[in-house]
Image (cartoon, rainbow, N blue to C red):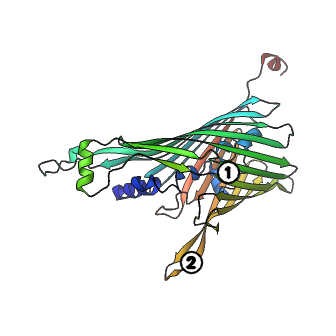
Amino acid sequence: MRYALQVFAVLTVHGIVIPALYAQKYSNEFLAIGVGARAHGMAGAQTALVGDVTAAYWNPAGLSEITAPFQVAAMHAEWFVGVAQYDYIGFAKSLNRQQRSFLSLSLIRLGIDNIPYTINLVNPDGSVNYDNVSSFSAADYALMGSYARQLNHPAWTIGGTVKVIRRIIGSFGGCWGFGADWGVQYRKNNWALGLMGRDLTTTFNAWSFNLSEREKQVFQQTGNELPVGGTEITRPRFILGTAYRFPVGEKTVLLPAFDIDITTDGRRNTLLRTSVISADPRLGIEADYDGIVQLRLGVGNFQYVKKDFSPTEERLSFQPNFGIGLRIGRIQLDYALTDIGNFSQVLYSHIFSVRLDFKERSTPAEESNL
C-alpha cells in the first residue's frame, strides 16, 4: 500500500517526467503551496497582511514589518499518509532600523523519499532478486534570498526575492531553475494594501537526464519513452491583496484579508477564467486576543468539478481552512487544518509552524543603565 502511495505521490507532485517538459502551465507548482500555518489557516490571503519572515514567500515587502532584529521560522506538513514531506525554514535579519530594511534567506523542500527502484529486480537470466531493489528520492528545492526596505514615504515598503530552483529525481534526472519576485505594501491607519509579482523574470527550469544503458534498455523493453532534456517556463502571476484591522473591544482585533491570484498562462480551473488569464480569490480572517491567542478561518481554491451523476454539468467547489495560534513570549506557535495537497486520501492535512523572535543584545552602555 505504501509503495502504491509513493508512486501516486511522485506522479502527482512532480507530474509525469516526460510531459512535464512540454506542459509548462503548472511548472514549479510546489512553490504554489505556501509557507506558514498562519497563512494556510487563512487560505493564503497574505499579500497585504503578512509582516514576518514568511513574507519572503508571500510578499517580500512585508519583511519591513518585522519588529525583532532577527527572526526565524520553520514549518512542516505532510500528506499521502506521510509519504510526501514539505518543509520550510527561513531567517530574517535587520540591516537598518531607520530604513526598516531586512535581509532574509529561505529554503523550501518538497520530497518523497525511499521510493523502491525495481529496475534491476529481474536478473538477465529471468530470476528475481529482491536484493537488487534500491531506493531513490524525488525532491524539489527552492532557495530564496530576499531584501525589503521602507521607501521615503513611511507608509510604503518594497521588497524583492531571487530564487534558485533545484529539482531531483534520483540519480537519473534533475533540473536547475532561476527566477525573481517583487512586492510592495502600503499601510495607512487600519488599512493595508499589497501587490505581489511572482516569477516576473519568467522562471526557467533546464532539465537533464543521465540514464545508464541498462536503464535505457528497460525503458524500451517496457514501452516507455526515453526522457530527454528540455526547458520548463513558469510564467508571471500577480497577486493583489487588501486587509483591514478592526478593533473589537479593548483586547480583541479582527483582521479580514482578501487576495486575488491572477495567472497569465491561459485558462485554468478557477472561479474566474478566460483564454488568456485566470483569477483565484482567497478570503481569510483572523481574530487576535491580546496578541496571545489567534483563531483563523479561510476559504479558497475555488474550482468547477463534474457532478457525480451528471458529468455534463459542473458544480462549484471550494476549500475551507481553519487555524489557531498561540504567542508565548518571543515564540509564536501556529497550526492549520487544510487539504494542502488537494489530492490526499484523507480530507484534511495538518500543518505546524513555529516562529522565534530574537532579542537584540544590549550594548555595555545600555546594560550600565539597567
- How many other residues sit within 10 Å of disc 1, few (<14), some (14-19) or many (≥20)? many
Residue 18 percent across, percent down from the top left: 39, 53
Q: Residue furthest left?
A: 125
User: What residue do we see at 79% from left, 34% from top?
Assistant: 100
Q: Is residue 243 left or right of residue 172?
A: right
Q: Is residue 145 above or below residue 169?
A: above
Tag 1 secondary structure: strand
Q: How many marks?
A: 2
Name the outermost residue toward the bottom. 310
Residue at the spot x=66%, y=58% of the render? Answer: 262
Q: What x and y, as percent, mark residue 325?
A: 67, 51
- Residue type at mark 2 is Glu
Say which residue appears at 65% left-offset and 40% top-offset.
161
Residue drawn at (55%, 60%) of the image:
339
| Amino acid type for the residue under numbered disc 1 | Gly
Residue 4 at x, y = what percent? 35, 58
In the foreground, 76 or 31: 31
3D distance between C-alphas at marks 2 and 1: 36 Å
Observer able to see residue 48:
no
Q: Which numbered tag is attached to residue 325? A: 1
Q: Which residue is mark 2?
A: 314
Inspect this view and state whether residue 29 appears. Answer: yes
